[in-house]
Image: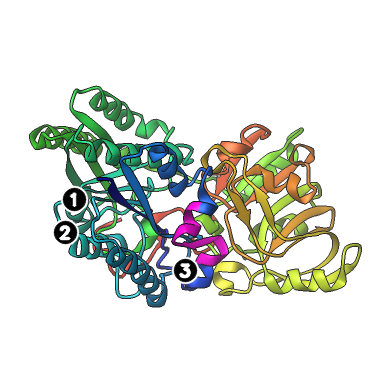
Amino acid sequence: MKKNVLTITFSHETNAFCPKKTDIQDFRNMYLYVGEEAFTMQRGRREGVGAFLEVFEGCDDFTLIPTLSAWACPSGVVTANMYDFALNQIETVIHNHKNIDGVLLNLHGAMVAEGHDDGEGDLLEWIRNLVGWEIPVIASLDLHANVTDKMAKCATALIPCEEYPHTDTYETYTKAAELMLQTLRGECKPVMAYRKIPFLQPLLPSASAQLAPLYALTEELKKQQGILSARFTHGFFPSDIAELGMAVLIVADGNQQQADAAADALYRLTCQQLPNLKITYPSFEETLDRIMAAEGGPYVIADSSDNPGAGGLGDTTHILRAILQRGITGAALATITDAKAVETCIVAGVGATVELELGGWSDAEYSGGPLKVSAYVKLLSDGKYLSKAKMSYNVEFRHGKTAVVEIAGNSVIITEISRQPYDIEIFPNHGIDPKEQKLIVVKSSVHYRATFASVAKEMITVALPGYSVPIPQIYKYKKWKGSV
């Protein structure tokens, strides 16, 4: 008899300080597929469901059952309507199948929903109450998951990605699916050890020297016979829940004592390394002075504090304002989210000059307020293009209606929908050659490094006002009671 494996993607990285709640339409803006549509739309793509399908392709002893595949751009708390919608879809499928032999999930690990501070923990517990505690429940996670006690209790195995930029997400989805396959075939019996580290780690790239000892130990642990996975999470500090922070996750083959010993070793080393896990960001003004005095380019500045990939709204005007005030030309900026400005450009048409109050539509304290500019409309598009980045190859990016304008000798991409422009393809797909720019500005934190490194003379991340400032100490936490 074939074994049935339920597949679920429900992924959101929640910034509790972002004022914009995340509703059903926000998921639809990225992707929201129900039932078989998830398999149709994601087969062959470097997404969770695509990896699950590839691993089980040709396995005649298994049937994969789609439920829901939903992912939204990081932003504020997920609405109760969206959370309940997801649970209802999953429950309907479970009730329509009498026998469920395993549940395979693609989660983020830092979801906060209305009424559910522990979004994934509550989800996993709810699933357990429906399918029982005997079958394997295995989930892939983002590196920035805030793993909670409930998540660890309710999952058979949690497999976070390891790299930041997240260039290994597809491999992580694949590993989770392979572990499920091996478990159901009786080839292994995963047991997990979990250790919480209540430390708010800043947004350190995985290649950072400070993290090297931790990654070296995980590689050593993986060489032990019987260790199926040895990984740790960085946590996501803007979520503001009681269980913020890093975590150690070790999965062993049937040997809980071995898993615990490995987890204790990695936990001890991580705790010893905590004082070194710091980042100092350069002065933006001094950085701009240095770039403009230097020869050549392009130099890439990342506006981490307004990163839509961490809950920024994409509307801040601090950097563009400074560029214009200094009379700088030859800069290209991606992106400013401003649906009203895009619509103005569409009505005027390509070749028109329009007067805009650009960006700054959120709280002026964070956004810098709108910027009055005269803009020449160079290009209009639907904001869609296929990613060529390793972490999202062949995935369609959707920025909604998009306008490319020239403002005082600089190119600015204005979008209807807020989304992190970490793939360099956003520029050539909107008529801009990144190699020809003196300065490139992207609203990103770390992911941009994976593709912009090929052209950048230097990449600099700065911290300005915004909703996704990459410094844990600036946030006024309400639910996190630890020290920062």
Q: In this view, does 378 lie to the left or right of 224?
A: right
- Horizontal side of 182 relative to 419 (left or right) equals left
Q: How far apart are marks 1 and 2 (CA)?
A: 7 Å
Which residue corresponds to mark 2?
Answer: 132
Identify which residue, 326 or 429, lies in the foreground. Answer: 429
| Residues at circles 1 and 3 in contact by the CB criterion of under 8 Å | no
Tell which circle, 2 or 3, labels the residue nearer the N-terminal end.
Answer: 3
N-terminal-most mark, 1 or 3: 3
Question: What residue sits 31% from the left and 55% below the top?
Answer: 484
* Residue 258 picture quarter: top left
Q: Which amino acid does label 2 sit on?
A: Gly
Q: Look at the image and say whether residue 28 sits in the magenta stretch.
A: yes
Please give the name of the residue rendered at 56% of the width and 59% of the height, measured from the top-left corner.
306
Q: Which residue lies furthest to the right in this view?
A: 351
Q: Specify the quadrant that holds the N terminus.
A: top left
Q: What stretch is highlighted in magenta?
A: 27-39
Determine contact: label 1, label 2, CB under 8 Å: yes
Main SS of residues in magenta: helix
Label 1 Cα crowd, 10 Å radius (few <14 / some 14-19 / many 20+): some
Q: Name the residue under label 1.
A: 135
> Does residue 296 lie above or below 319 as drawn?
above
Identified by mark 3, the residue type is: Cys
